[in-house]
Image: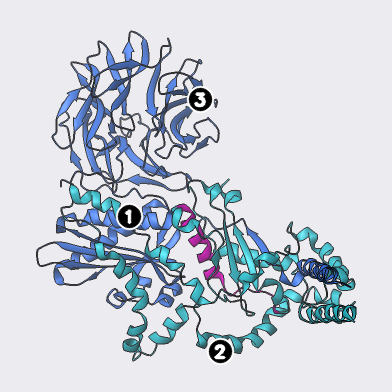
Chain colours: A blue, B cyan
Amino acid sequence: MNAPAITRSMVACLAAMSIALAATPALAVLKIDITQGVVDPLPIAISVFHAENEGARESARDIADVVTRNLERSGLFRPIDRRAFIQTPAAMKVQPRFPDWRAINAQALVTGTTTMLEDGRLRVEFRLWDVFASQQMTGLAYFTSPPNWRRIAHLISDAIYQRLTGEAGYFDTRIVYIAETGPQIKRIKRLAIMDQDGAHNRYLTDGGHLVLTPRFSPTSQEITYLSYLQDKPRVFIYNIDTGQQEVLGDFPGMTFAPRFSPDGNKVIMSFIRGDNSDIHTMDLRTRRIARLTRHSAIDTSPSFSPDGSQITFNSDRGGSQQLYVMDADGRDVHRISFGRGRYATPVWSPRGDLIAFTKSTRGKFYIGVMRPDGSGERLLTESFLDEGPTWAPNGRVLMFFRQTPTRGDGSGGETSLYSVDLTGHNERKIVSPTQASDPAWSPLSSPPPLIR
Amino acid sequence: MRNGIVISAVIHVTALWVSFVGVPEWMRSDPEIIEQAVIVELVTISEETRAARPKPEKVKEDKPPPSPREKPEPPPVAEAPPPVPVEPEVEVAVVVPDVKPLPAQKKPVAKPKRKPKPPTRKTAKRSPDAPQKAKSKKYKFDPDRIAALIDKTPRKQATQESPETLQVQPKITSRTAQPLEGQPLTLSEVDALRAQIERCWIVQAGARYAEDLVVTLRVFLNPDGSLRSEPKVVEGDRLAADPFFRAAAESAIRAVLKCEPFKMPVTKYDRWREIELTFDPREMLG
């Protein structure tokens, strides 16, 4: 046998061996698909922060409390009762004893330190730990003037939420809404603003004029809303910093249902002429007005998609009030809702994947969501009267207002704000100093300072 | 003469190979057929296939897992803050006069991991602390832990084996005197493991793009069912790039860490020493 023949036979042998090797079962990796889990909130332990000095003691507890309430309200976390904690805040300065936290079934742990600095500022540091992996997930420190501790608590809550869910939080945000006081027949409605947890409430208007449907600009410096000027409903813009109000556009008729475009350069709204209502935009710099719909039906409640390319609105052009989507220039109008009942106030989610709406049928109101193509309709709430959904900036939570039925003796009819997450399971009442309606959620990280 | 050498060499190599790896599957006839008879009985229990397909190219990953290679995974966690600081920075400008993340923040992040060891000297006086800390890092290579495993193994073998294997054993032993080694896991054994992990897996409802958040973990186990090393994320490069994927992967890892040790028949250790778990929330979240 010559050399090539030997090589050939060796190669053949090796090939045979490798085929046999591939067929050997001992080397197989067991593969298992896990398709079912538990949809429970994540157990998280939020320790009172460790105060480095006496001046920081109060904020050490307050910040941990606000973070705890924020995370609990989100429905995604279950803060563990502090009485179950084994390790003290001081003992965790270096590193937590993870077995102590595993023992109480905590999956995540938040620790922190507050220090009152000599220059009068407060230093707040926090760390988020993965209890089972025994490692730090994130850690940040902030400096602030002591009265701003609550803002720091919201920023910390956002950081924790973001790290554990992958999604931006929504705790450092504010809500603008209509504060309602007085009897039903002589209701005073004022424009008001507060933190998303109900703190730092203040009134922006004095109640002299009726105010409706406030909406934040993308920068949250400005609010557009509907108010009455000479008994005619008109769209206004209000600057939060300066307190200045301005009528938007010189329309001969009524304008209402205003909302900013995602870039903040335009306001989209309805304009009534005679019996007909159509959708218009106004460029805030050039003041040019563009008419987007031309139909004898009532077209109203427009809302831009987050990329500004499309608009959703409601119209009764098909016989009943339903939701429609069109391009930003008014072309390609198509209906997306086909269910029973009336659909109103569509709002496009900031993450673009859903449109929230109010639906009414058979004497009940619902807040629901559907995809922009009309598929996947889900109703999240149900009551006598639910209305006016607004999205949290991360597109995972909705706020709306609910009114109770008015009884024969004139009692009832109270309005309050509620939030609900996309699962529909986590519905919460938002505490506000007065009765409240028409909420609008601000974007994240609103730059203006909090005014107490 | 040459032919003789070649033939001799081939026979030697084959003999050596057979002694190391064993006879290829297609050459073994009886045991596998008997095994199938058992499987047929159990088909109604679950839809799952009975054994994993062989993947020779991945076999090499079997050995590296011990702690030193797993350690590089935590660093992405330490780098996590960058997205967060953006918000505080916005705040510096307008709202809270001085709010900003510490520029030196990465140092504190790294410190705690190094620190714990020196502090143990200090805390060593407090006797309860030290052993607990050692336990907390299960998947890091730890001689004490190995010793503990050796102690446990025989005991667990006895206890774990009985409930799972008793049902199957009578049928097999009636035909063969061989123990269960090398046999594939039965569907009920796989189902038991699946159920154990599913109980520990917390799925986030309402996450965006849930359909993309399918996470595959490679898990390496000791004969007592405990983790031999930290679970490895198969698409590890997505961790740093995609915060949603990272959150989903960490949730899957937490499920595995929380559930271990897994109750598995020790006689079939070869079959489950390495497991690939695919966490797929699509069915749940619909």
| Same chain, labels 2 and 3 | no
Compared across the picture, whether B147 is left or right of A363 comes to: right
Q: From the image, tell me which residue sits under label 1.
A: B84
Chain for disc number 1 = B
What's the CA distance linking mark 1 and mark 2?
43 Å
- Classed neighbour count for the residue bearing mark 3: other residues with Cα under 10 Å, few (<14), some (14–19), many (≥20): some
Q: Residue at x 18, y 48 (%)?
A: B93
Disc 3 secondary structure class:
loop
Magenta region: which residues?
B244-266
Residue A319 vertical placement versus B132 (above, below): above
Residue A128 vertical placement versus A190 (above, below): below
Q: From the image, tell me which residue sits under label 3.
A: A341
Q: Within the magenta stretch, is there residue B248?
A: yes
Tags 2 and 3 touching, CB below 8 Å: no
Disc 1 marks a residue whose amino acid type is Val
- Classed neighbour count for the residue bearing mark 2: other residues with Cα under 10 Å, few (<14), some (14–19), many (≥20): few
Front in this rendered view, residue A401 or A348: A348
Q: From the image, tell me which residue sits under label 2.
A: B147
Q: Looking at the image, which residue sits at the far left?
A: A119
Q: Looking at the image, which residue sits at the far top?
A: A274
What's the CA distance linking mark 3 and mark 1?
43 Å
Disc 2 secondary structure class:
helix
N-terminal label among 1 and 2? 1
Characterize the magenta stretch by its predominant secondary structure: helix
Residue B63 vertical placement versus A282 (above, below): below
Which dot, 2 or 3, sits closer to the camera?
2
Disc 3 marks a residue whose amino acid type is Gly
Q: Quadrant of the N terminus of chain A?
A: bottom right
Q: In this rendering, does residue B95 appear at all?
A: no
What's the CA distance linking mark 2 and mark 3?
70 Å
